[in-house]
Image (tube, rainbow, N blue to C red):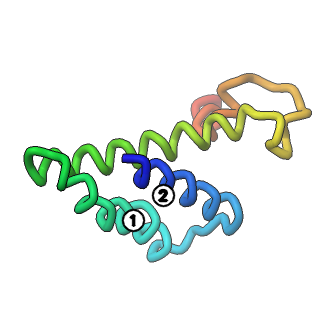
Amino acid sequence: MLSVVAASLATHLIFKRTETHNPVHLIVLLLGIPTLLTPLVARHSSSILSAVFTTFATFWATLGASIVVYRLSPFHPLAKYPGPLLCRVSKMYMAFLS
């Protein structure tokens, strides 16, 4: 499980550095990496379906949590500017207002 969390944090760093929007890169980062990590979790799971679900859920939850924590942290480039909390966490707030 630790390898899944570490891979998710590494994926967040890749997204932060490259800001990729290429569909191939997105598929590899968001689907390929958890797929490659599924056999590591499958050894400790009762079925392959539960291993896939556990791997993907852990990967995406860690990725989402790391993005939210980074956006709220003082290390974010826009942290010194005030604003609503929902605007800092998600870009969907502005879509909701418009």
Q: Please tell me the numbered disc located at residue 56.
A: none
The reply to whether the C-beta atoms of the residues labelled 1 and 2 are less than 8 Å apart is yes
- According to the picture, the residue beneath numbered tag 1 turns out to be 33
In the picture provided, is 15 more to the left or to the right than 48? right
The residue depicted at 68 percent of the width and 58 percent of the height is: 16
Residue type indicated by callout 1: Ile
Coordinates of residue 96 in the picture (x, y in percent): 58, 31
- The secondary structure type at the circle numbered 1 is helix
Q: Quadrant of residue 95?
A: top right
Identify the mark nearer the N-term, 1 or 2. 2
Which residue is located at x 70 percent, y 31 percent?
87
Q: Secondary structure at mark 2?
A: helix
Q: How crowded is the residue under tag 2: few (<14 C-alpha within 10 Å), some, or many (20+)? A: some
Query: Measured from the top left, where is residue 23 in percent x and y?
Result: 47, 72
Q: Quadrant of residue 75?
A: top right
Q: CA distance from mark 1 to mark 2?
A: 7 Å
Q: Quadrant of residue 90?
A: top right
Residue drawn at 51 percent across, 46 percent down: 63
Residue hosting label 2: 7
